[in-house]
Image (cartoon, rainbow, N blue to C red):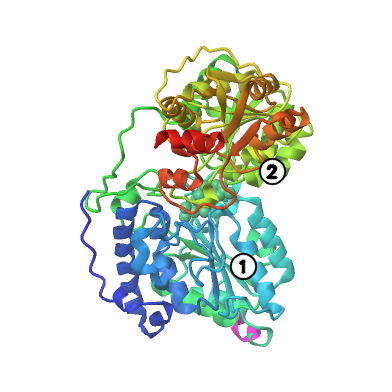
Amino acid sequence: MTDPARPRTPLLDRVRDPRDLKALTDAQLRQVADELRAETISAVSVTGGHLGAGLGVVELTVALHAVFDTPRDRLIWDVGHQAYPHKILTGRRDRIRTLRQKDGLSGFTKRSESPYDPFGAAHSSTSISAALGLAVARDLGAEPPDNCGLGDCIAVIGDGSISAGMAYEAMNNAGHLGTRLFVILNDNEMSIAPPVGAMSAYLTRLYAGAPFQDLRAAAKAAAHLLPEPLREGAKRAKDALKHLAVGHGTLFDELGFSYVGPVDGHDMDQLLSVLRTVKARATGPVLIHAITRKGKGYAPAEAAADRGHATAKFDVITGAQAKAASNAPSYTSVFADALIRAAQKDRRIVAVTAAMPDGTGLSKFMDRFSDRCFDVGIAEQHAVTFSAGLAAGGLRPFCAIYSTFLQRGYDQIVHDVAIQRLPVRFAIDRAGLVGADGATHAGSFDVAFLANLPGFVVMAAADEAELARMVTTAAAHDTGPIAFRFPRGEGVGVEIDWTAPPLEIGKGRIVREGSGVALLSLGTRLSEALKAAESLEARGIRPTVADARFAKPLDRDLILSLARTHDILLTIEEGAVGGFGSHVAQLLSDEGLFDHGLKFRSLTLPDTFIDHASPSEMYAEARLNAEDIERKVLELLGAKVLGKRA
Ligand SMILES: Cc1ncc(C[n+]2csc(CCOP(=O)(O)OP(=O)(O)O)c2C)c(N)n1
């Protein structure tokens, strides 16, 4: 793919930071927006990443920075995946083509990256809470440590992200506190997939049939934001325009917000007018409902089913994406196929996703069993407890949530699922390092936070055949909660026996017999352990390699026998410290295995948040590759063997 020619951006070239926007006319701001859109498309074509969401907020980005005084005014983008145009305008244009690459810009907002990112994100629906916290800090006279001052606080949240409970918790609190706060509802009628739920339908009803407010109307609709003495004077005009000002009696008004809208989020004049008005007059929380189009202004994105939500590198002219050919099926698709097979035989099997039907593979399941598949919106907490209810009602729910997003449902896992021993099946995709999305999306903690829960079964698939078998195992497990984790990306290319019986709970397997050194792997690092074993064999060391399969319950017999019959035991897992290796160490210590000279080590993810990079760069940084395993074994064997190499 050739590097596309850079677009011509004469006006944008003059904007080094948002202060430069202040000198421009409204007409020039419109031109800046056009150039910003072209620059965003050009940058993402060489980096890949989130395209559609950013294109939908180009005008909004320019208008917000032109009207407000960032970084003193705090602009918080929910999720942060739409913030590429914001990054270009806020002093990061020279690095925009490093997006999501190692040592480059993050694909989300990040406090450490810029004072213009006052609150980091990547998981959704946090922006209103964070903006409210900052607004209250301002009211109490606090000084933020970045020395930028503290003025207005503005949260921009999408119609998908506003489906999550946190957004309502925040609005409820904001309405109660009554402080000045701006929420821009960026309504593009899309989440990653089309949004679902009653709230989405409500938002559509709010503007269906209502014309966009024209310039005059939009300004006057905000008349009710005027301070008390001025309000009377504006009352007649306001009444006359009442039918245009949809914001009376909306849910947002009931929550204590002044609702302004709907406004055309691509009409710069209208945006500028509304923002200037609310900035001049607001005394309490205001919600501005902007209607936008995801992927706006780039035909291939607008035409795509996901409106260009996430893309690989692409050719700007044709929109064709550079996708690497793969030999093995993705873990996600193996999960979906296995679940469909199980569901064909068992009508009690149902599936739940939190706004990720494609990412989890459940869209395939939905095509097949539409009445047995539930997309609950971006609502992981609800997804978990809803699944618990389904299980309590006698169904066999598979709750499919990425490792990183499952974190949000943790109390529900403990309180609603584990304590009640309800057989919810957790399909945990994206377990382990995920690459370009970085630390916020890494699936590092699931084993650590699940394997300490009494009664939980926690499995990790070593390859795609194991994954298929774990789906069968989970389907058959009715005595309590059970989880299986698997990584992003493709399998290793092994044949899948779809008819394999369920695994025996708590039983691992020896994959390669050896002596002296035992490598005990949990999950897909098994292939690296096997590579390390082969390489060690060339040095005359023949490690035993075992696949634990279960982090809970541990295969006590297997682990104790490995410890008793080998001098060195090394565990390997793609998870944070406190997971599988820690449980093995606890067992060995409880059973007195350390009292007799066993050399035990545990390879885990390091105790740091690893920044975005390619998966292979991240594995290298985590030291979880075959050569790291080999080095650790040699280190434990001591200089004698190391010397042998030389
Ligand atoms: C807690 C959480 N769950 C799931 C996701 C995955 N996710 C990223 S963006 C997105 C859709 C957001 O939709 P919306 O807020 O409407 O923004 P848009 O992309 O349409 O601009 C989802 C589900 C996430 N980031 N955080």
Circle 1: is it few (<14), some (14-19), or many (20+) Cα within 10 Å? many
Q: Nearer the viewer, residue 575 or 127?
A: 575
> Is residue 234 found inside the magenta-colored segment of the image?
yes
Query: Is the CB of the residue bearing disc 1 within 8 angstroms of ligand 1?
Result: no
Can you identify the residue that label 1 sits on? 131
Q: Residue at x 30, y 68 (%)?
A: 35
Is residue 279 shown left or right of residue 91?
right
- Is residue 111 visible in this depiction of the protein? yes
Q: Which residues lie in the magenta part?
A: 231-235
Residue 203 badge: none
> Is residue 600 found inside the magenta-colored segment of the image?
no
Q: Nearer the viewer, residue 374 or 574?
A: 574
Can you identify the residue that label 2 sits on? 410
Tell me where residue 214 appears, x and y as whole percent: 44, 72
* Real-space CA distance between mark 1 and mark 2, rounded to the nearest whole angstrom: 24 Å
**Which residue type carries mark 1?**
Ala
**Disc 1, SS:** helix
Q: Is residue 158 above or below residue 551?
A: below
**Which residue type carries mark 2?**
Tyr
Name which quarter of the figure residue 559 lies in. Answer: top right
Tell me where residue 173 appears, x and y as whole percent: 72, 63
